[in-house]
């Protein structure tokens, strides 16, 4: 580290992310010394919900975001179900899983092809042997792979039309299941759509069957596949990652959390999640305990910055504060510690062997985060194919939710970017409080009252800075490896 005082520089605003983001960098010599992440836009959906009828959450909460609105719908419906004791029938569970998996898969495709990979088509990398191919495949707005990915994504979203009526902001997901049932002919159409999506992913992204990707067991198997596999965007990513040493970039705390994914995904009549809930900390997989979650406003432009509180007791009252505050984002913590969430957390907790091996070797890095998403891009179509066959036309799809009792309830789900939580408080038939912690709230949180940086802030420490770079490429790769959704971050 240089002996000269750090140079302070604002990086951003960032393109090819969802929403508005700035990062304040303290640069010492050729490295980032410290970083402060600023979510610049306050939106206040939590406040808009206060005083309304509880079921209004199903219409308002999804408006938080136009690309992960189903995740917000599911979290809201789950919180409402907790107050009504509604238990969705098997068809309702399966259909909701398919709808959410469709959105998550669409987000994963979008992130890889439209947000992350175009960076490697930049002239900065023209001296690398793979640059010409990266330019042809990934150039923003005109790459061959970008156009193909958009077609695949558009075809995939026809699933939404069949099961959810429309997207985004569907009202099909309800506390007691889904409001839209389908017949046998529609199930055949769903299978046909998924067959086309599978073919696109196998032919363009992976170059091998989805099963082959899912079964990659360790670093040796990945290296062997790269040496002998055919040309594919997956193989090109592996070449780029090795050349640029992406496995050494962007390591945070190696603390991960997931609330669990796909309830009823193994047995439609059993609400247990197919991918379990859990946290990874201190080199162990431990239970996920929602009661250990708190929110800290110490560095946020919000009132109540003097205390740390559980989300159910939280507030979202804007209050511009000079001095210490530098973002609209709160600092969620679990048992007082910052945690990273996303595909990497899901795959670690469920025990996916390749992701566990990569994290054991290098930690949570740019490379292992993107690899976890690629594993999910192969795994989700396989799950969706199975779930479509489990649908039973003619059986119930939804049950009445009944009276919504006064009280408090939580709703969790796994969005593409990680764990999403809704905390609902109803009094006298109206919403008395509504708090949301989105995945990017976890990942892009500011420092807490103890001065501990959030996961992205920690991941940026030590990032290399080349002479003349205003927004260093390394910083851009690290930021995009988390796939931020800043609209959800501050709601």
Image (cartoon, rainbow, N blue to C red):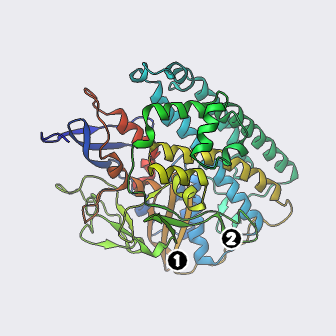
- Residue situated in front as seen by the camera: 314 or 210: 210
Q: CA distance from mark 2 to mark 1?
A: 28 Å
Residue 76 picture location, percent across and down:
56, 64
Disc 1 packing (10 Å; few <14; some 14–19; many ≥20): some
State left or right for residue 115 relative to residue 21: right
User: In the rendered image of this protein, does residue 46 appear above or below residue 227?
Assistant: below
- The residue at 60%/23% (across/down) is 144
User: In the rendered image of this protein, does residue 458 appear above or below residue 116?
Assistant: below
Residue 328 picture location, percent across and down:
32, 54
Residue 229 picture location, percent across and down:
66, 32
User: In the rendered image of this protein, does residue 220 appear above or below residue 54?
Assistant: above
First in sequence: mark 2 vs mark 1: 2
Residue 64 visible in the current orientation:
no
- The residue at 44%/41% (across/down) is 480
- The residue at 31%/42% (across/down) is 22
Secondary element under disc 1, as helix, strand or loop, is loop
User: In the rendered image of this protein, does residue 294 appear above or below residue 321?
Assistant: below
State left or right for residue 329 relative to residue 364: left
Quickly name the residue at label 2: 271
Quickly name the residue at label 1: 429
Number of numbered discs present? 2
User: Residue 397 shows which numbered tag?
Assistant: none
């Amino acid at each position: 580290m240089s002996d000269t005082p750090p140079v302070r520089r604002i990086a951003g605003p960032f393109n090819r992310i969802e929403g508005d983001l700035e990062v304040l960098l303290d640069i010492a010599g050729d490295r980032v010394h410290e970083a402060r992440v600023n979510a610049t836009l306050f939106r206040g959906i939590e406040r808009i919900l206060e005083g309304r009828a509880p079921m209004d959450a199903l219409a308002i909460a999804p408006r938080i975001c136009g690309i992960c609105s189903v995740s917000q719908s599911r979290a809201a419906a789950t919180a409402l179900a907790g107050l009504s004791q509604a238990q969705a029938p098997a068809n309702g569970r399966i259909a909701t899983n398919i709808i959410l998996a469709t959105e998550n898969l669409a987000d994963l495709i979008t992130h890889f092809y439209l947000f992350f990979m175009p960076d490697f088509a930049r002239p900065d990398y023209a001296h690398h042997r793979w640059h010409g191919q990266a330019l042809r495949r990934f150039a923003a707005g005109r790459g061959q792979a970008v156009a193909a990915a958009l077609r695949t994504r558009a075809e995939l979203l026809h699933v939404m039309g069949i099961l959810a009526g429309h997207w985004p902001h569907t009202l099909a997901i309800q506390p007691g299941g889904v409001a839209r049932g389908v017949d046998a002919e529609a199930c055949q159409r769903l299978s046909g759509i998924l067959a086309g999506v599978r073919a696109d992913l196998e032919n363009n992204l992976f170059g091998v069957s989805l099963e082959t990707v899912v079964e990659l067991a360790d670093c040796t198997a990945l290296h062997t596949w790269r040496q002998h596999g055919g040309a594919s965007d997956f193989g090109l990513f592996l070449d780029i990652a090795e050349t640029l040493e992406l496995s050494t970039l962007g390591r945070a705390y190696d603390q991960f959390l997931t609330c669990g994914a796909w309830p009823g995904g193994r047995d439609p009549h059993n609400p247990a999640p197919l991918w379990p809930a859990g946290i990874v900390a201190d080199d162990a997989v431990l239970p996920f305990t929602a009661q250990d979650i708190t929110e800290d406003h110490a560095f946020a432009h919000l009132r109540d910055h003097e205390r740390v509180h559980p989300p159910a007791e939280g507030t979202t009252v804007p209050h511009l504060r000079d001095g210490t505050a530098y973002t609209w984002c709160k600092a969620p913590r679990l048992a007082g510690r910052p945690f990273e969430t996303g595909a990497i957390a899901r795959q670690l907790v469920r025990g996916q062997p390749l992701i566990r091996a990569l994290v054991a070797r290098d930690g949570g890095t740019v490379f292992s985060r993107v690899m976890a998403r690629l594993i999910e891009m192969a795994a989700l179509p396989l799950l969706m194919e199975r779930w479509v066959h489990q649908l039973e036309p003619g059986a119930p799809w939804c049950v009445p939710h009944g009276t919504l009792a006064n009280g408090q309830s939580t709703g969790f789900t796994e969005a593409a970017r990680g764990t999403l939580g809704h905390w609902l408080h109803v009094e006298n038939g109206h919403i008395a409080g509504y708090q949301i912690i989105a995945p990017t709230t976890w990942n892009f949180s500011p420092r807490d009252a103890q001065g501990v940086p959030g996961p992205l802030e920690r991941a940026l420490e030590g990032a290399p800075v080349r002479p003349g770079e205003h927004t260093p490429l390394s910083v851009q790769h690290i930021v995009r490896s988390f796939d931020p959704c800043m609209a959800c971050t501050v709601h």
